[in-house]
Image (spheres, grey):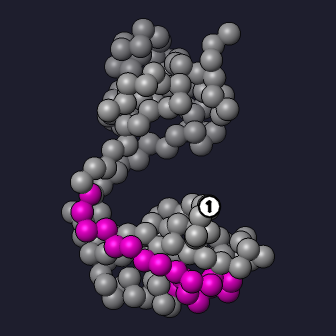
Amino acid sequence: MPKKTREGIDRTDSRIIRLLQQDGRMPNTEIAARLGISEATVRSRLEQLIREKVIQIVAVGDPFKLGFGAVGVLKIRFDTKKVREVIRELQKIPEVWYIAVTTGTHDIDIEFNARSLTELHSLIFEKVNQIEGVLSTETSVVLQFPKRRYDWGTALDDDDRD
């Protein structure tokens, strides 16, 4: 029986994902040829992976080159009785593109892209800090990206990552 992850993907799905992580625009016909499977198999597996939210296929840009003047991470502590409300309110904020519930000294990490320091100030003081249940925030602003990769594979990959 083929090895699968908790999410139910197998080695074929993993290999498809790995190729798309290297080139998200790779045609299904090329994926099929590289993996020795039919284009219909690639198409149906991709549809299922997308439908089940295992993957999403998007263009990833450099936020600085896209005009954002303030990029970074906000670490948030909140009243644990208000977790659902805090998350629901954070999800409404357009500058926030990533929310993770975490362990450690903070409860949530959010990543943001703001057009300017003025917009960042508004994000912190007029939006996030005004959410009922938020106790404190700590802001880290990204200065540069010495490494930024999206081709990290799946848990089924051999340990050949660099």
At x 24%, y 54%, the residue is 146
Whether 53 is drawn above or below 38: the answer is below
The single residue placed furthest to the left in the displayed view is 65
Position in image of residue 32 (x %, y %): 41, 16
- The answer to which of 71 and 107 lies nearer the viewer is 107
At x 58%, y 70%, the residue is 106
- Asked if one can make out residue 61 in the rendered structure from this viewpoint, the answer is yes
* Number of residues whose C-alpha sits closer than 10 Å to that of mark 1, classed few (under 14), some (14–19) or many (20 or more): few
Q: In the picture, residue 89 is in which quadrant? A: bottom right
At x 59%, y 21%, the residue is 10
Whether 31 is drawn above or below 117: the answer is above
Whether 21 is drawn above or below 94: the answer is above
Residue type, label 1? Thr
From the image, which quarter does the C terminus lie in? Answer: top left
Whether 42 is drawn above or below 49: the answer is above
- The magenta stretch spans which residues? 127-145
Residue on which disc 1 sits: 103
Numbered marks: total: 1
